[in-house]
Image (tube, rainbow, N blue to C red):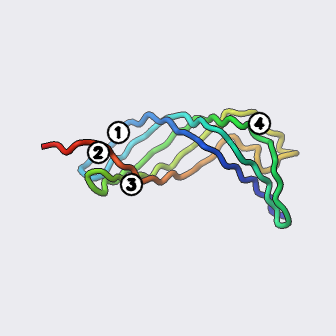
């Protein structure tokens, strides 16, 4: 039987990036940062039912390390690809009771479209 844990939250990443390589339309960078936020929904989902649960902290905090690739689409728009490694700051849950939540580390891929506010230079 498959059991899934689905959490929803509002998370604010704060990153400090270091430029590795920069060309006219491309930027390669590495970054470190912290993720902070609030988990507002936690559900356990099986084939037959969905239950509200409360097994992780409502306050979310984690450190991240990443390498990103930004492509310039126009004067104001950029497309960003950021593979991310996140280490959560929380107590480790017992794997005997929460088989799917004992991990404190995760990998993700952030994809974003960015708009830059700046005046045209003459």
In x, y percent, where is residue 10? 60, 43
Q: Is residue 34 above or below residue 7?
A: above
CA distance separating discs 2 and 4? 40 Å
CA distance separating discs 1 and 2? 7 Å
In x, y percent, where is residue 104? 69, 40
Does 64 sit left or right of 55 as displayed?
Answer: left
For mark 4, give the secondary structure. Answer: loop
> Label 1, on which residue?
19
x 68%, y 35%: residue: 59
Q: Are marks 1 and 2 in contact (CB under 8 Å)?
A: yes
- Dot 2: within a 10 Å radius of its alpha carbon, few (fewer than 14), some, or many (20 or more) residues? few
For mark 1, give the secondary structure. Answer: strand
> Label 2, on which residue?
22
CA distance separating discs 1 and 4? 34 Å
Does 98 sit left or right of 83 as displayed?
Answer: right
**Which quarter of the image is occupied by the N terminus?**
bottom right
């Amino acid at each position: 039987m498959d059991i899934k844990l689905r959490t929803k939250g509002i998370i604010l990443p704060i990153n400090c990036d270091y430029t590795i390589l920069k060309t006219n339309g491309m930027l390669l960078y590495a970054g470190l940062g912290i993720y902070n936020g609030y988990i507002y929904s936690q559900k356990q989902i099986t084939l037959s039912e969905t239950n509200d649960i409360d097994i992780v902290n409502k306050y979310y905090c984690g450190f991240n390390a990443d390498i990103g690739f930004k492509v310039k689409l126009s004067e104001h728009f950029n497309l960003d690809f950021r593979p991310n490694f996140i280490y959560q700051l929380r107590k480790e849950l017992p794997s005997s009771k929460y088989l799917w939540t004992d991990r404190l580390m995760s990998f993700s891929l952030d994809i974003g479209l960015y708009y830059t506010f700046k005046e045209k230079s003459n």
